[in-house]
Image (tube, grey):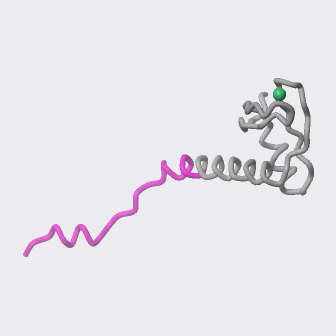
Amino acid sequence: MQEPTIRFPVTCPTCALVSLSEIPIAVIAGALLLEKNIRLHAGCHDQYWTATFIEREQLRNHLSALKVQSRQEASQPESFPGQPESMLAGASF
Ligand SMILES: [Zn+2]
């Protein structure tokens, strides 16, 4: 089974090239929750470094955006509640 990941733009500390890094959601969520370091990787220079405060905040925003999306999808199939007001308005005497 493939682990769910998010793609996150990282800036290489050596050449400042921005590239997309794919990190497992469980790793980010766990590290943010437990205040652990997050290892980021830039493919261009094969560089590993620890996410800065700003990068952690960006990852947090990415995660919360994902959660909002899945919550909206889950709430869609809910049945629409009846509106008695509109029934009354339609009845003319
Ligand atoms: Zn680089």
Q: 28 or 50: which is nearer to us?
A: 50
| Quadrant occupied by the N terminus | top right
Q: 69 or 41: which is nearer to us?
A: 41
Q: Does the magenta portion include 69?
A: no
Residue at image x 74%, y 35%?
4
**Tag count:** 0
62 left or right, relative to 37: left
Residue at image x 61%, y 47%?
70
Whether 48 is drawn above or below 59: the answer is above
Whether 15 is drawn above or below 79: the answer is above
| Quadrant occupied by the C terminus | bottom left
Query: Which residues lie in the magenta part?
Result: 71-93
76 left or right, relative to 32: left
Residue at image x 78%, y 48%?
55
Residue farthest left in this picture: 93
Q: 55 or 45: which is nearer to us?
A: 45
Residue farthest bottom in this picture: 93
Q: Quadrant of ligand 1?
A: top right
Instruction: Provide residue 6's location: percent of width, then percent of height.
Output: 72, 38
Residue at image x 56%, y 49%?
74
Instruction: Provide residue 59's location: percent of width, then percent of height.
Output: 75, 48
67 left or right, relative to 26: left
Q: 81 or 61: which is nearer to us?
A: 61
Instruction: Provide residue 50's location: percent of width, then percent of height.
Output: 90, 44
Q: Quadrant of residue 15?
A: top right
Instruction: Provide residue 48's location: percent of width, then percent of height.
Output: 91, 34
